[in-house]
Image (tube, rainbow, N blue to C red):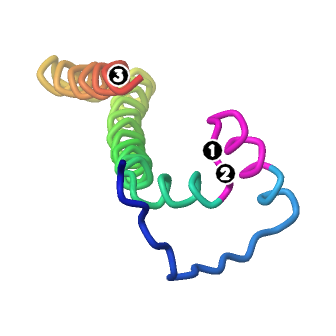
Amino acid sequence: MAKKLIKNYPIFLRATRLEYVKIKIKAKQNNRSMSRFAIEKCLSDEIFQEKNDQENLKNLLFELRKAGNNLNQIAHSMNLSRLTDSQPPSKNEISKATNELKNAVELIKKKL
């Protein structure tokens, strides 16, 4: 017979009514008491994974914005060069900006 663990360390949580209902539903869906469900969730690494995912998405969004900004600057330069008969951006600059954008899109695809 397995030895029963003594649980004599209470933990008190405060939740809104909506949070309480959501936790209660999730606990029931997982065939757990609210207490057991909360303990298992608190001890799992999922919370940290979600935070890491959010940080990764923020970084990806930053990279995408940066690449998009570079592409917009090149488009602006191209349009300006047509109006002023000045030198347009080089093929190297255009290639670099499009590669940055492609890389950002590929990173996003991998994360999705």
Q: Are marks 2 and 1 in contact (CB under 8 Å)?
A: yes
Judged from the image, the secondary structure of the residue bearing numbered disc 3 is helix
Q: Quadrant of residue 57?
A: top left
Is residue 24 shown in magenta? yes
Of the pair 17 and 81, the residue shown nearer to us: 17
- The residue under label 1 is 32
Residue 12: x and y, percent? 65, 80
Q: Is residue 66 left or right of residue 79?
A: left
* Alpha carbons under labels 2 and 3: distance apart: 43 Å
The location of residue 16, given as percent across then percent down, is 82, 68
Of the image marks 2 and 3, the number of the one nearer the N terminus:
2
> Between tags 2 and 3, which lies in front?
2
- Amino acid type at image mark 3: Val
The residue beneath circle 2 is 33
**In front of the other: 94 or 50:** 50
Q: Which residue sits at x=79%, y=59%?
A: 20
Q: Is residue 102 above or below residue 38?
A: above
Residue at image x 57%, y 81%?
A: 10
- The Cα–Cα distance between marks 2 and 1, rounded to whole angstroms, is 4 Å
Numbered label attached to residue 105: 3
